[in-house]
Image (spheres, rainbow, N blue to C red):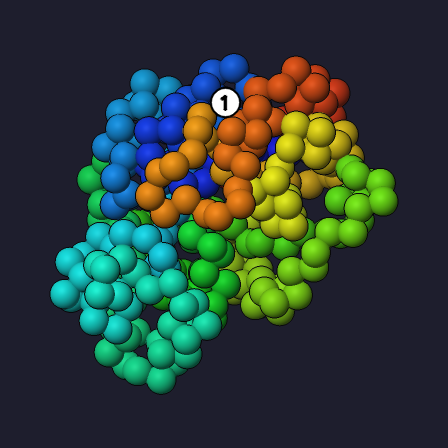
Amino acid sequence: MKRLVVTADDFGLSTEVNEAVEQAHREGILTAASLMVSAPAAADAVARAKRLPSLRVGLHLVLVEAWPTLPPSELPDLAGPDGLLRADMAKLGLDMARRPAARRQLSAEIVAQFEAYRATGLPLDHVNAHKHFHVHPLIAGAVLRIGRRYGMRALRVPREPREILRRAEPGARPRAALDIAPWAALLAVRARQAGLLIPDRTLGLAWSGAMTPKRVAGLLSHLPDGLTELYTHPATGSGFPCEAPGYHYAEERDALIAPASVAAARASGAVRAGFSDFL
């Protein structure tokens, strides 16, 4: 049986992102969105989600390169002088391993984001993290421990088979995600031991920011059995704070509403829904 969750990350980042999420759910194949609870347009995202009861919403934990939920003054090891969470992921991960204070701040920030999500009143469909930082073993441990208290039942594990990409785009040589592959494998084991639902594969890693209509239709045409998450970064435009350089946001929105994508999703025979619908 084929099961498919089509997710938009960075829900709440800007009104352009929120508009695209709403449009892609109403008119296209989008089934879920991951909310950044402290981003500038989070309140607008929550209001839209409440108007779209069939849209499944989860928590997009932000632990790097964006806005914390706690005051930056309470996160001296995690936040930079600009008030945003640090962007140097490798050194930040090392600091967490070295400094007990950094780990305490990490746990406090994760709790604050789960609390902020709970305050929205939205059911928690899933959890993932900005830039997949939850694959870091220390962060994974904190998320698994804290998430249990807030009803977390599904977690993204970013693993993407190269073969599906080659079938979707013959001749393509997608970049490997070897930098996170071992940690993703460990995360899968830990998540399953915790009784969480995880996708068998996550599509969108190699072509992050470049999920064109042709690529999305190609991926949907070659879906294997099992649970697949296809994630995207749609927006109706660009020029908003903390956007990723080089990302083609509008093209990813177009990929979610393109007739070819809609037709490919239907032809695949996959059941499309949120993670919570498959529990």
Task: Please tell me which residue is depicted at 30% across the width and 74% down the height of the picture.
Answer: 103
**Percent x, y of residue 68:** 25, 55
Callout 1: SS:
helix
Q: Quadrant of residue 54?
A: top left
Residue on which disc 1 sits:
24
* Amino acid marked by disc 1: Ala
- Using the image, determine if residue 253 lies above or below residue 201: above
Can see residue 277? no
Towards the viewer: 131 or 151:
131
Task: Please tell me which residue is depicted at 42% across the width and 52% down the height of the picture.
Answer: 130
- Using the image, determine if residue 236 lies above or below residue 157: above
**Percent x, y of residue 246:** 53, 45
Q: Is residue 8 left or right of residue 112?
A: right
Q: Quadrant of residue 257?
A: top right
Q: Is residue 263 left or right of residue 104?
A: right
**Percent x, y of residue 3:** 64, 34
Task: Please tell me which residue is depicted at 28% across the width and 81% down the height of the picture.
Answer: 100
Q: Is residue 175 left or right of residue 186?
A: right
